[in-house]
Every structure is written in C-alpha cells, then in structure tokens.
Image (cartoon, helix red, strand yellow):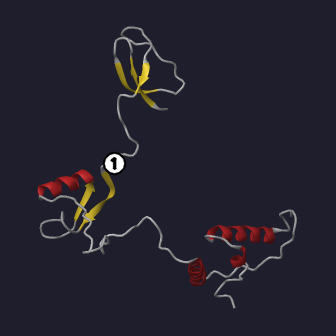
Amino acid sequence: MPIYDRQCPSCGAVWIDQLERIATPDPPCSSCGTLTKRAFLTRTSASVAPDGIPGGIQIKHGICWPDGTPRRFDSRSEMKRVAQDMGLTNIVRHVPLPGTDKSPHTSLWVSAPVISEEERIRHWHEHERLMGYAPMKPRESTPGVQIVGGGPDRLSDIIADSIHKIESSGFHEAEYRGVNNPYRK
C-alpha cells in the first residue's frame, strides 16, 4: 500500500505518512470534521543511495591507515568523515593531454568496443570452440506447420536448438547453418 500525507483544507491540520489504499475515500479531520485531502508535503526519493556499503570496501590509498595499510569502511559517511579529518577532498578531475580533450586516465564505459560483425562472429565461434561446444547439426526443414513430437530425442533437439539460438547474439540463419563458420572445415 502506498504512503500519503493528509492535510485539512479548513483548519490546516497535517498527518504525515498515512498508509492507505489508493481508493481510500477522504477521511474527516479529527479536529474540525472537514474532509481531508491528500497532500505531498514530504519529499522522498526511491533513488536515494543507502549510506551503508554491503560487505564493506577496502581503501588502499588516500584514506588508508597512517602506516599505509588498507582500511575497511562500511559506510559512505564514515569515509567522508575520515577524509575530512585528514584534510582530504574527494574529487575527480579531467586533465586532458595538452592540445586535446582526451586523458589517458579517463575513458567512456557506457558502450562496448566497436567491432565489425565478422569480428564478433569470429569471437563467438572462438568462444564456442574453447568451451568445447560441438557445432549444431543442421536439421532438414519441412515447409508448413509441424506438430512437435516424435519422441524425446526430437523434443530435446528442438530445446537445444532454441537455447542455441537465444544464446547466440545476433542470430543469422546462414551463420547458424554453418555457412560462415570460420572453424568448420
């Protein structure tokens, strides 16, 4: 059930964080009897990061112990307090090389490296070979609607075929049939 705030339009009485259903009718004010209205008086955010760090974090530089050994922190506020006590400020600066906007210490992590489709397929087949997966045997295809059946072997082939298709990113019929497989001889 959602949590709402209530406010009386007549006397101004306020009730914070009332747990109620969406379809709950407006209850009367306990002070004056006027129907209360939903109000959004408190600001909460679902995207607030918790202060605790599950499992903790070991810091090896900067805010480590004075003798240089790594120090474990279990909360962000503790890290901030220790940094302030040591006179340090948590800062990230972008310092590009002279004449450019690029820095050897920063990189864009939001996308995968750009490689050609042929290179991606070669990597995929190399991974399959290294993992010891045997290439799928092509099945004879029959046009029209078919009834799934014919014993457990047939159903196992269909399931294995489906899993193989799902796991291969960017499925292409020609690659699946082994036409472009660089390791098939």
| 67 or 81: nearer the viewer | 81
- Front position in the image: 123 or 71: 123
| Residue 30 in the figure: left or right of residue 26 | left
Q: Where's residue 31, x and y in %?
A: 36, 10
Kind of residue at badge 1: Pro
Q: In the rendered image of this protein, does residue 174 appear above or below residue 72?
A: below
The picture places residue 105, in percent across and down from the top left corner, at 29, 72
Which residue shows up at 27% across the image and 66% down it?
A: 94
**Secondary structure beneath label 1:** loop
Query: Where does label 1 land, which residue?
Result: 50
Quarter location, residue 145: bottom right
User: How many numbered marks are there?
Assistant: 1
Q: Is residue 152 above or below residue 46?
A: below
Q: Position of residue 174 (x, y in %)?
A: 72, 77
Q: Position of residue 74 (x, y in %)?
A: 27, 55
List the single residue furthest toward the front: 99
Return the residue nearer the eye: 91 or 101. Answer: 101
- Give the quadrant of the C terminus: bottom right
In the image, is residue 58 above or below residue 37? Answer: below
Residue 116 to residue 33: above or below = below
In the figure, is residue 116 to the left or right of 97? right
The residue located at (70%, 76%) in the rendering is 176
Query: Which image quadrant is residue 23 in?
Result: top right
Residue at image position (27%, 53%) is 75
